[in-house]
Image (cartoon, rainbow, N blue to C red):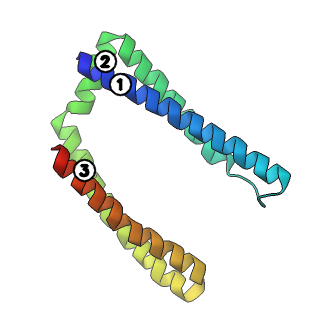
Amino acid sequence: MEEFRKKLRTKIVLYWIMAASLLIALIVLQVLVHRGVLRGETNMGFFVGGITVLIMNIMRMRKAVKDDAALKQWYVRNTDERTIAVQQKAGNFTSLFTIFLLSIAAIAASYINETVYWTLGAALGVYPLVYLGALAYYNKKM
């Protein structure tokens, strides 16, 4: 259980780093927009929402690290084989469905706007690279 507690502590640190990165990015973008370097508005809702979700998760994990009962419940939830299998099946379906929707959107965009078409095409091109990278990583890890 101590090993799992260490993993949660590491996750907490990573979440703090991500929250700080989002906050720094938001501030930099706001300054650039204010100075006229960038036009338009920053998507403040994205940044604030991301920071809020990260901080909420940090608070939940800190509670689990401090309380043995909550840690055990967190451990069971994260190591339950059925839950893991369901998440993998849902992830596989979601990935295939996303590729399908991106493909349909790229085809439709090719008739409407070339920039959108190339953007969707780039997303479709990056997807297999990410998949192959993850596949190589997990084949080595497991």
Coordinates of residue 47 in the picture (x, y in percent)? 62, 43
The residue lying furthest to the right in this view is 35
Discs 3/2, front: 3
Q: Secondary structure at mark 2?
A: helix
Q: Contact (CB < 8 A) between labels 3 and 1?
A: no
- Amino acid type, residue under disc 3 in the picture: Tyr
Using the rendered image of the protein, determine whether residue 48 is visible from the camera's viewpoint: no
Q: Is residue 103 left or right of residue 4?
A: right
Q: Give SS at disc 1.
A: helix
Q: Quadrant of residue 124?
A: bottom left
If you read the primary sequence from the N terminus, does the residue marked by circle 2 or circle 1 appear first? 1
x and y percentages locating residue 45 in the rendered image: 65, 46
Residue under label 1, please give it. Answer: 8
Determine whether 76 is above or below 135 in the image. Answer: above
**Mark closer to the chain start, 3 or 2:** 2
Q: Nearer the viewer, mark 2 or mark 1?
A: 1
**Picture residue at 38% right of the left edge, 27% below the top:** 10
Residue 72 placement, left or right of 19:
left
Pick the front one: 109 or 132: 132
Dividing the picture into quadrants, the one containing residue 131 is bottom left
Task: Give the residue drawn at x 32%, y 21%.
Answer: 6
Q: Amino acid at mark 1?
A: Leu
Q: Which mark is residue 94?
A: none
Q: Nearer the viewer, mark 3 or mark 1?
A: 3
Q: Position of residue 36 (x, y in %)?
A: 84, 57
Q: Nearer the viewer, residue 25 or 70?
A: 25
**In contact (CB < 8 Å): disc 2 and disc 1:** yes
Amino acid type shown at disc 2:
Leu
Which residue position is annotated with label 2?
71
Q: Quadrant of the C terminus?
A: top left
Q: Residue furthest bottom?
A: 111
Please tell me the numbered disc located at residue 137.
3
